[in-house]
Image (tube, grey):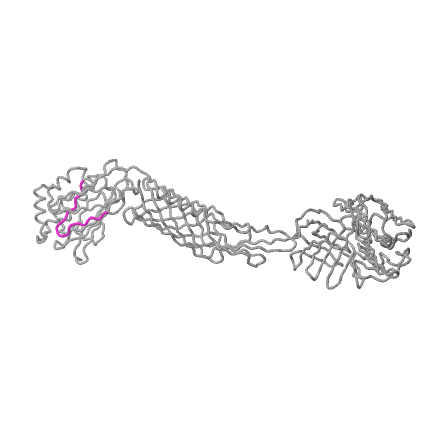
Amino acid sequence: MKKYILFIALFALITSCKKHKVVELPQTNSPIFKAEGLINGQPVSIIAGENDFEMISLINQFNGIDLAGGLLTNGKEELEFYFLDEAIFDPNHSFDVNNTNNLYYAYVPKDSAFANLNSSLFSNIQDLQSLSYYVNGEFAGNQLASVNKPGLFNIEAKLVFQDGETLSVENPLLLGFNEAETVIDAQLTSGSSQLSANLIVTGATATAVNWYLDGSLLSSSLTFTRVITEGRHILKADYTLSDGTKRQKSILIKTNYPGYASNDFNSAKTNIANNTQLDLKAVVTYRKDGKVYTSKTVYNNSLTGFAINDLQYYGIDGGGHAILKGNVEIICDLEENVSLEIIPVNLNCTFAFRIP
Amino acid sequence: MSWSDKDIDKLFSENAHPEVPFQESYWAEMEAMLPPTPPAKKPFAWFKFSLGVAASTLIIVALYNLPQNSESSAYSRTSNIHGEISGNKKMNNIFANHIKTAAQNNKLIKETEIEVDTPENDKNHKLNNSGKGLSHKDVISKGGQYFSIGNKNENSKGGFVKGEIVIAENNPDNINNISIDNSNYLYNRLTTNKINTLDTKEINFNTEFPSIALLNDVEFVKIPSRLTYFVDVYGGIGQSLIANGNTLTTNFGAAVGVNKQYGRYILGAGLGFVGVRYNNFKFDEKSTYYSFTKTTYRNNFNYQYLYNFQIPLQLARVTKFGTIELNIAPGYTFQSQLDYEFYENESIVRRNQVYGETRGYNKFSLQTGLGYRIPICGSWEFGVRVQAEICQTVKSQAEYLDKKHFPINGQIVLRKKLGF
C-alpha cells in the first residue's frame, strides 16, 4: 500500500508543478491597411507593415475643423485621406455609409479670400482711433486683413478709442461650411442706459442662451432688457441651437448711442466662402519626394467621386478613440502645390479612420 | 543378458578402485548388454538394476528451476545435466544406460542429447558408444536411442558429461517431482527437485570415484497458468530526429504490470512512466500580425524533459534462450520542462523555464518495439529492447522547424518478478 501512496504522491507532485504560461501568438494574418492601384499611371502598392509603412488613424485638424482621417506613411511617401463625416453645424446630417453618392471631394479655390476683415466692420464706431485684427491669436493686419482658407477661425479685433480706452471683440468665423445664421439684435435707447437684446437665428432655433456683459452674466433669456452702466461694453451671447451646436457671438455697444454697435463679422465672409461647401467632403493628399499632391485644389466633379464601403468598427487606439476601418475607392485628380502638375489617381484602399 | 544384484556389486567393486586395470572384454560385454532398440516400457526394470549399483552415482538433471512466481509451463521443460564422470568405459556405459532407462521409464523425456567432453589434459580420453571414438561435444545419442558413454582409455582419470533433456509436452501425469537417487556407495542420498523453472541446473558429479548417473522417478505436474506481477526499471538512449540535426536523447522510466502465461506465450500489461531528456529538441512558433503596422512574434521552445505515462502491452514467448517480447505502448505526455523565449520583432521580451507546456506535438504517442530478456538471478531478469515511436509527431499548426519524427530508443531493462 505504501508503494501506491508513494506513487500517487509523486504523480501529484509532478502534475502540480507551477505552470508558466506561454504567450499565445496572434494568428498570422494578411496585411489589412493598404492602398493599391495607380498614381499618375504608375502602379503603387502601399502596405502598412511593409517597407516601413504604417497606418496612422488621426483626427485631421483642418483649420479648426475635425476631420476623420487616415494616413499611410513611411516618412518618405505618404497617402492621406480624410473627410468630414458630418455637416459642421448639423450633427444630424452625418456620413451615411449606405449612401455615399453625395460624398464628393472638397474643392478649395487657391489664393482666394474667404473673409475680408476691414474697418467697415466697425463703420458705426465713430470714435475709433485704431483697429488691429488677429486671426487665431496671431496678428493679421491693421485696419485690413483677410483669411484665405476655409475653416473655423477665431477673429479678434483690438480696438483703441479716441479717449484712450481699449477693447477687444472676438467672434468665431466659419468659412466654407454651412451654419445657421445668427444675429444679435441689440437696442440701445438714446438718453438712457437701457439695453434690450434679442438673438435672431435663421435656419435653427436657439434652445438656450446666456448673455454676458463684459464677461459678467447678464441674462439667460432669449431676449432681455436691462439698464446697464454708461459707456462701452462687450455684449456676448453664448447659445445652443436646436441641432446641439454651441456657438457664441460678441458685439460692441455703447450706452446712449443707439447706432453704436459692431456686427459679428459675418459680413466679412466672401462669396467664395459662401459658395464653398466642405461639409461631407473628402480630401486626398499624396506626398512623395518632397512634393505634395492634393485634391483640394482640383475641381473633381461629381463623376469622379469616391466611395467608402464596408465601414466597420475596428478597435480602440491608444488614446481610447474608436477606430473604423473602411474600404475606400479613390478616383480623382491631384495637383502638386508648386508645379501645379495634375496627376490622376485610381486607388483601392483600406484605411483606418478615427472618428471625431 | 540381465543384471543381477550380484553382478552389479561385482561390477562396482571392480571399478571402485582406479588401480583396477581396464579390460577390453568388459567393454565388449557392456556393449553386448545394451539393447539395440529402446526397451519396452518397464517401469521398474531400471529400479531392479539400480539395486546392484554400488558405485557413486552422478545424476545429471537439467531443470527449469523457475522462481516461485515466474512464468512456467507444465508441459514444456528443458533440463540440463552437467557433470563429470570418472572411471572406465564400462562404468560410463552403465551410466549412459541408466540415463536412458530413466528417460524411458518416465515417458517424460522426449529427447535427450548428451554431450561428452574429455579433460584437456587427457586427450586420449575418448568416449564412444561403438568404439569408434568421439571427440568432445559429440552427440552420443538422442532420445529414443540407446547410447553409451565410456572411457576408451581405461586409465583415464575421468570424463565430462553434460546434456540436455527435453521433457515431452502434454504429459498427462500430474506429479511434479524429480527424485534423484544417488543410491551409490558414496552418498546414498535422495535428492528431490521440482521442475518448475526453465533455469539450468547443474550438478557436479563426483570425480574421485566411478560414477553412474541414475535418474529416478522423474515426474511432472501441471502447474496452472496464473497471473504474475512485475516491476520494470529501464533506461536508455534514443535518436531524436525532430530538431535540426539528429539529437541524442536519454530516457528513463519504470513500470508495473501483470503477466499471464499461456504455455510458452505471455501476455502482459502495465502502467509505466517514462522521462525523456532532450539535448536539442528545439522548435519555434512564429506569427506575423498585420494591423497598423507589422509585428512579428516568435516563441522559442527548447524542451529539456518530456514525461509520459504509458500503458505497455506485451506479447512474449519463452524460449530456452530467454524471453522475446513484442511490445506496444500507447502513451500520453503529461508534463514537460523547457526553456522558453518570447520575441517581439526579434527582440527578446521574456525568457524563463516553463513547465507543463506540451504545444508543438501531440500528447498521445504510440511506441512499438522488440525486446529480449534473460533471467539473471532468482526472480530478476535483465533485458534489452528497441522501441520506435510511430504516432507522435510535431504539429504543423505554426511554423515549426523541419523534422517531424520522434525518436528511436534503445533501452536496457531490469525486471523484478513479484507474487502476492
Q: On the picture, is A320 further left or further right than A216?
A: left
Percent position of residue B295, x then y: 61, 55
Left or right, B318 with respect to A332, comes to left
Q: Which residues are magenta?
A: B201-216
Residue A131 on image: x %, y %: 86, 60
Quadrant of the rendered image containing residue A291: bottom right
B202 in magenta: yes
- In the image, is B11 to the left or to the right of B118? left
Q: Total marks drawn?
A: 0
Is residue B117 shown left or right of residue B385? left
x and y, in percent, of residue B211 in the image: 14, 48
A208 and B216: which is toward the camera: A208
Q: Main secondary structure of the magenta part?
A: loop
Image quadrant where residue B100 sits: top left
Q: Position of residue A252 (x, y in %)?
A: 86, 54
In the image, A75 versus B323, the foreground residue is A75
> Could you say which is closer to the camera, residue A283 or residue B238?
A283
Q: Quadrant of the N terminus of chain A?
A: top left
Is residue B242 something one can see in this rendering? Answer: no
Taking A128 as reference, is A211 above or below it? Answer: above
Res A239 visible = yes
